[in-house]
Amino acid sequence: MSETIGFIGLGLLGLPVANNLLNAGYALRVYNRTASKAEPLVAQGAQLVARPVDAVMSGGIVVSILWDDAALESVVMSADFLEKLGANGIHVSMSTVSPEISKKLAALHAQHGSVYIEAPIFGRPEAAVAKQLWIPVAGPEVAKERVLPLLKAMGGQGIFDFGEDASAAVIVKLVGNFLIGSAVRSLTEALSMAEKNGVDPQAVVDMLTQTLFPAPIYKSYGKMIAEKTVTFSQSKIPLKDMGIFRKAAQQVESPTPIANLFYDLMGGNEDEN
Amino acid sequence: MSETIGFIGLGLLGLPVANNLLNAGYALRVYNRTASKAEPLVAQGAQLVARPVDAVMSGGIVVSILWDDAALESVVMSADFLEKLGANGIHVSMSTVSPEISKKLAALHAQHGSVYIEAPIFGRPEAAVAKQLWIPVAGPEVAKERVLPLLKAMGGQGIFDFGEDASAAVIVKLVGNFLIGSAVRSLTEALSMAEKNGVDPQAVVDMLTQTLFPAPIYKSYGKMIAEKTVTFSQSKIPLKDMGIFRKAAQQVESPTPIANLFYDLMGGNEDEN
């Protein structure tokens, strides 16, 4: 395969995903704010570029995996990015961002004749290496068909279509992250109660994950919590995501007692006025 | 099989479990505060008795499935109960009670030469009928061996041994109920957020239970929440259990921010001074 893809954001997840694309035969133009992170990819033939727009090909596909709304928006609004992507161009946005920014950027891309697709990733960096990612995807139909092979090549073992409104995919991602955070924090509270009452927490995890909760999240985090090799703050669900979930719920008047508690426990209100 | 078992407590779970024992060939002496509930069992040959002690055979096995600490304690402390159970008698307690009462009753039975075993049940009444119950069990080894066939006949598809201290099994039950409650309430909060943002909650449940959360609790409650046929208050995890979990944690200085929130949301502080 010789199609060239633009790839913006080489963080913990971006790097192995980009690497999967190189291995699948795609050519890559990569951009990262800290350029040195691109070195392993450049060593495998990726072309490192100096600005986000340089990763864009007119009418081509550009992928971004960035930290938050602000980072994503600064890339999209950077000089000539939208103009160059232009007609038939597709931006596959894989960051965990707010539905607000998603709707705003979808409209901006449409104004420039290009398509904005949301395809946020469920999976830790190890899962990316193992090509065991789960990807909800949403956006205009024709564009989704064009990017489907790309999502599979990135390591998507399961890709789930949530329709034409791009923001639906970030809603799903926020729901998933909230539920992961809730499960991990609940497990921590429960296993601490068991252990301090003299019951082996690993034995509790063994029973529960063979019965009521035979799910990867409960198995992997249960083991790590029982062995005290992880705390909730290391569960990889950042405060930012809990904050976006909460805001997205509150904007539609959906109650958030649990998200409020977690946001507080994670220190979310400490630096607010 | 002709062994006669005493069976105390014919509630939503007690009734189908007792019925399984009859079907497995055990003879039953049944007691229930509201005697009329025993009718279907009596029709199948069970003997209805007038007092808890009448369900007890000296040196035999008596099973109880009762609502709470107070109901269990009143049965055990009722006239001649412990005296009659006597040497080699076994009381299999299957109620969801506090570790405190469990320790207290284990000591009381020991003083009378009998054995107290905890074997609380995970499973709704339908699961009892289908013989798909999960049972953590704890107590003295020899007695556990004697009751194991009974637990299987009751519908225990999986029985998990948590050692010699009977209270360990109720700790496991409390942990499981807390995690069920947390999962159901978190799903409710998350799916409401998705739906009010225009995303089909059943599609979200479908993806998540094929990926991160392929667990019966998420599948069954996810579907019910998406279809609005269940609310958290109907999740069968009663306020009482959340209260026992919280107290058992606080007594060993284990933090309970989530249990506190749920207890409050369930109205747990409304009738306190």
Image (tube, coloured by chain):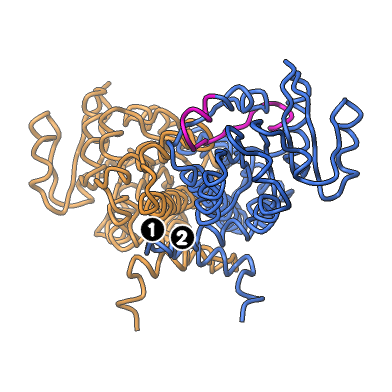
Chain colours: A orange, B blue
Question: What is the C-alpha distance between the residues marked 1 and 2?
Answer: 6 Å
The reply to whether residue A128 is in sight is yes
> Judging from the image, what secondary structure is the residue with disc 2 in?
helix
Q: Residue at x 49, y 27 (%)?
A: B142
- Residue occupied by mark 1: A241
**Contact flag, marks 1 and 2 (Cβ < 8 Å):** yes
Nearer to us in this view, A112 or A220? A220
From the viewer's perspective, is residue B150 above or below residue B261? above
Nearer to us in this view, B192 or A212? A212
Please give the label number shown on residue A126.
none
Callout 1, which amino acid?
A: Asp
Q: Read off the magenta span.
A: B127-145
User: Any magenta on residue A255?
Assistant: no
Q: Are marks 1 and 2 on the same chain?
A: yes
User: Any magenta on residue B134?
Assistant: yes
On the image, the x and y values in percent for residue A190 come to 43, 52
Q: Is residue A266 left or right of residue B156?
A: left
> Judging from the image, what secondary structure is the residue with disc 1 in?
helix
Q: Residue at x 26, y 42 (%)?
A: A13
Callout 2, which amino acid?
A: Phe
| Neighbourhood count class around disc 1 (C-alpha, 10 Å): few under 14, some 14–19, many 20 upward | many
Quarter occupied by residue A117 = top left
Quarter occupied by residue A22 = top left
Q: How many marks?
A: 2
